[in-house]
């Protein structure tokens, strides 16, 4: 998901692994021209690795490419989308704690980015899925404060309570992000599993994308850097 230089010729890679979750590992000599590892450890490549336990950091001794996404994600919008995904996973995940749902989520998201006409439009649903894997999934069909139904209802974003709240619970003195009935329906469709009775959608309305982004930023305590640099010109206007 991320790499940074170490010393003269080495790099530290932040990897998302199936077995151990997030792992930092060093590839020695990887910045030298003759290194065979460098090309295999491109951003977001799916690889089979051999790791040697080091004193501080694990050492990558071998890498085989299982699947490369690099050709697809060099496109600017795909690159931004993938960078935000990587950065969010990196920021939310504890080292050496395997969360299989997050590994699978990234795997599916990369496949989706590869074929998407608008890769950035995948982010809101990805973010909802990530919150779900982290146990932070906002309830979509009921008020997060009182449990009243949000079906065919407007709502507002209550970050502190972790989701959408109904108008009966609206805190009048607070300036909040409001969603109309169509927005709330879109939020519910975005939250729905692909095989659920409720029709699932992949595309967020702009106000819904904003609400999800705000909720993620609230949980994260900051905004993802990759998204922030480009948000102005890549976000569709409302
Ligand atoms: Zn309520």
Image (spheres, rainbow, N blue to C red):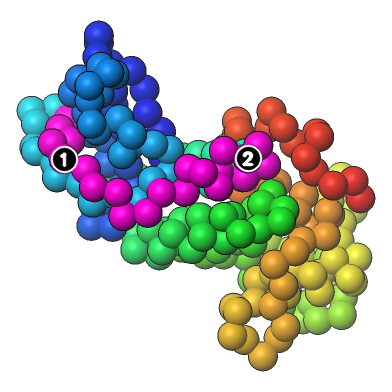
* Residue occupied by mark 1: 62
Residue 160 vertical placement versus 75 (above, below): below
Residue 150 quadrant = bottom right
Q: Which residues are magenta?
A: 57-78
Q: Residues within 10 Å of mark 2 (few under 14, many from 20)?
A: few
Residue 67 quadrant = bottom left
Magenta-drawn stretch contains 74:
yes
Question: Which of 130/113 is in front?
Answer: 113
Question: Which of 184/41 is in front?
Answer: 41
Relative to 40, 171 lies left or right = right
Instruction: List the single residue furthest toward the top.
Output: 8
Relative to 58, 117 lies left or right = right
Q: Residue at x 77, y 81 (%)?
A: 149
Residue 10 in view of the camera: no
Q: Residue 25's mark? A: none
**Residue 1 x %, y %:** 41, 39
The yes-or-no answer for disc 1 within 8 Å of ligand 1 is no
Q: Residue at x 16, y 40 (%)?
A: 62
Residue 227 quadrant = top right
Magenta-drawn stretch contains 58:
yes
Please report whichever mark, 1 or 2, sits nearer to the chain's N-terminal start: 1
**Residue 119 x %, y %:** 66, 52
Q: Residue at x 69, y 78 (%)?
A: 200
**Residue 49 x %, y %:** 20, 46
* Residue occupied by mark 2: 75
Residue 18 vertical placement versus 187 (above, below): above
Q: Secondary structure at mark 2?
A: loop
Q: Residue at x 60, y 79 (%)?
A: 194
Q: Secondary structure at mark 1?
A: strand
Residue 185 vertical placement versus 80 (above, below): below
**Residue 51 x %, y %:** 14, 41
What distance separates the C-alpha of mark 1 from that of mark 2?
A: 28 Å
């Amino acid at each position: 998901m991320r790499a940074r230089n170490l010393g003269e010729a080495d790099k530290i890679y932040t990897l998302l692994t199936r077995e151990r979750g997030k792992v930092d590992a060093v590839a020695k000599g990887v910045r030298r021209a003759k290194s065979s590892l460098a090309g295999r450890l491109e951003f977001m490549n799916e690889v089979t690795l051999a790791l040697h336990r080091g004193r501080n950091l694990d050492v990558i001794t071998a890498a085989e490419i299982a699947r490369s996404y690099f050709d697809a994600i060099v496109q600017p919008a795909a690159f931004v989308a993938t960078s935000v995904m990587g950065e969010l996973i990196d920021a939310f995940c504890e080292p050496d704690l395997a969360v299989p749902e997050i590994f699978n989520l990234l795997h599916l998201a990369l496949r989706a980015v590869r074929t998407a006409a608008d890769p950035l439009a995948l982010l809101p649903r990805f973010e909802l899925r990530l919150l779900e894997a982290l146990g932070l999934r906002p309830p979509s069909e009921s008020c997060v404060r009182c449990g009243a139904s949000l079906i065919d209802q407007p709502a507002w974003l209550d970050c502190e309570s972790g989701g959408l709240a109904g108008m009966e619970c609206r805190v009048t003195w607070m300036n909040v992000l409001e969603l109309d009935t169509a927005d709330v329906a879109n939020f519910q469709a975005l939250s729905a599993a692909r095989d659920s009775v409720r029709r699932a959608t992949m595309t967020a309305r702009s106000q819904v994308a904003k609400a999800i982004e705000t909720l993620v930023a609230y949980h994260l305590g900051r905004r993802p850097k990759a998204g922030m640099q480009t948000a102005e010109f890549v976000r569709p206007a409302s």
